[in-house]
Image (cartoon, grey):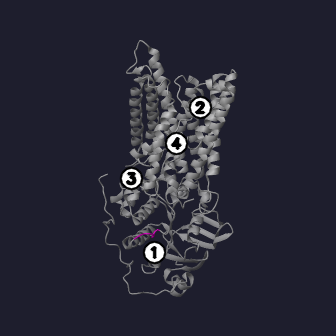
Amino acid sequence: MLWTARRQAISWFLSAIAWAVTALCCLMIGSTGIGFPDMSQPEVLGFRLSAVLVASLVGAGLAGSGLAYQAVLRNPLADPYLLGVSGGATLATFVLRYPARALTWPDAVVSGGVQAAAFFGAMVAVVICLALGREKSGAGGGRLSPTGLILVGVIISTMCGAILQFMLAIWPEAGALTGGAMAFLLGGLQPDVPSWAFWTAFAVIAISVAGMMALSGRFTVLSAGPSAAKTMGVPVEPTRWWGLILGSAMAAAAVSISGPIGFIGLIAPHIARMAVGPDYRKLLAPTVACGAILLCWADALSRGLSAQGALRVTLPVGVLTACLGGPFFVLIRMRQRRGQSGAGVGVGGGGGADE
Amino acid sequence: MSSHMAGPLILSAVGVGVAYGKRPAVMDVAITLPAGRIIVLVGPNGSGKSSLISALAGLVRCAGTVRWWGKSPAEWGVRAFARQVAVLSQNTSADPAATVAETLLMGRFPHHGLLGLEGARDREVLRIVSNQLGLTELLKLEMYTLSGGWRQRVLLGRSLMQEPRALLLDEPEAGLDFQGLHELAWTLRSLASDGLGIIVACHDIPFAAAVGGNDAGNDGEVILMGGGRAIATGPARTVLERDRLEAVYRVPMAASLGWPAIDFATPPVNLARRLDQPVDLSR
């Protein structure tokens, strides 16, 4: 019952095992067919291995990001995609990447620049969300409204998508960049991500997850409402800002290599919550693992489908996650409406009177 | 104010004032809380009880000075203050999906290290607090399965889990049945006799009289609030007079209508607590 060091270690260990099993299974699936790849073609295994690693990293980043936003906004529907954060990060990356491609900058500069631009775009989006998602005045003056946030998020996403499409239209050659037009609009995974890009994103996500470990106890107490959390010793405003910064950093790192893949940040924390309850300390490892696992499977599915000749091209994985996530979103919404989990699991904190 | 039994000074607040925009909620209230004393705030809705508690807890900006052991809440810092003073607000919520144990353990946060790991001390405090409040049988239940009164007891327990030296309780009696009320009064008295300083806002006059100390002879004090000011301060017997209450609350009052009422002077017999709802421990 207590969250001891031993239980935390077990939680990470089991999550790692679950991910490793998935990763092994996904290595068996590819556009060349189902089954362990022929060892006479080592490049096939290498290709699949990097596909699995990229999918895992992006999935873990998006899931961790979703968890951070859900904790900070005390809103189970928060997700980097729905908040427009993915869109903002994608747009910023694209804007930087297009001119950056023309110049011959060292990899490290481009890599750092892309991460910085993605982070900048993500933070701009989240700050706009926070500014416009607040109730202006009245009873809930200053309180973040769940519906308001998502409304603003959808608007930001749509606008970023429109600006991207406009730029792709005037610079058709830009679409030929890593991933092509579809990847920037819907999100797609390319196994041929340059290793500098992969490792930069990996470092950002790993550091952010470590930061989340230190914040997760605060997040749990924050679920009691901001002023109650303060009386229990949580510095509320710094916690919120750190949560937003880490969430945005993870979303930005993921999006910088995959484009705006939707719903992983929404689904993974929810699945983890069903298994371990609402305590963020207990949620972190299963959430990150669940994100990695989900995106691995989605990616394997898209590669497998193209192997069966069902499709002429590899389906962007963002299409699959959206197909998966849409119904899931509807399910959450229906459960909320039925009031099954009491006064809305954390939507505005149930009572809502607290700030 | 009988000072012969008073312990070392916990809280000294002078000239406390709170305003929401231009509307004043609390004006020029002074409170002195020594260790081992219970101060009861009574008064009509909107008389400033909750605002005063928020001000003392450092949750709202206020005029005047508030010193806990000589330091303001800001000087203590959020985390250190939470180890000294626990606050139960009216609008405190709990995640409905969290278990009773998880909700209680939240109160251990200010004692935890960076990773929020729990250990033997947390287990021991959980055992003490859940026995004290009769929550032991409920630990594995989710909060949404509890009745309002039991949820209130869990939230009080969460405050006690902080192992505070002082308690600020805003209507802890809300939603409690007779047994809960009776036990709460005795729990607060026992905490005070352990040396805690307690300030409790409430609406129940017999309860206020019981913890604000006349019949049990403990060292309590009642502050009657009206329109943001402290109208009367002193032992329950002198403050809670019928004429004064009628004037402040603007309702006719009768000393006794002959109905049975809780005998707060008699200690609770039922130490093995019963639950007011079916309990499923199979989860």
Q: Which mark is residue A66?
A: 4
The residue beneath circle 1 is B211
Other-residue count near label 1 (Cα within 10 Å), few / some / many at <14 / 14–19 / ≥20: many
User: Looking at this rendering, what residue extends furthest in the top direction?
Assistant: A40
Q: Secondary structure at mark 3?
A: helix
C-alpha distance separating marks 3 and 1? 30 Å
The residue beneath circle 2 is A184
Q: Is residue A114 magenta?
A: no
Amino acid type at mark 4: Gly
Q: Residue at horizontal 43%, vertical 29%?
A: A301
Q: Is residue B175 magenta?
A: yes
Q: Secondary structure at mark 1?
A: helix
Magenta stretch, residue numbers: B172-176
Q: Residue at horizontal 42%, vertical 28%?
A: A23
Q: Secondary structure at mark 4?
A: helix
User: Magenta stretch: dominant SS?
Assistant: loop
* Direction from residue A135 to residue B91 in the image, left or right: left
C-alpha distance separating marks 2 and 1? 66 Å
Amino acid type at mark 2: Phe
Co-location on one chain, circles 4 and 1 = no
Other-residue count near label 3 (Cα within 10 Å), few / some / many at <14 / 14–19 / ≥20: few
Q: Nearer the viewer, mark 3 or mark 4?
A: 4
The residue beneath circle 3 is B123
In this orientation, which residue lies closer to the viewer: A130 or B136? A130
Co-location on one chain, circles 4 and 2 = yes
Q: Are marks 4 and 2 in contact (CB under 8 Å)?
A: no
| Residue A228 x/y as whole percent | 52, 58
Q: Chain of mark 4?
A: A
Q: Chain of mark 2?
A: A
* Direction from residue B182 to residue A173 in the image, left or right: right
Other-residue count near label 2 (Cα within 10 Å), few / some / many at <14 / 14–19 / ≥20: many
Query: Which badge, 4 or 2, comes first in the chain's sequence?
Result: 4
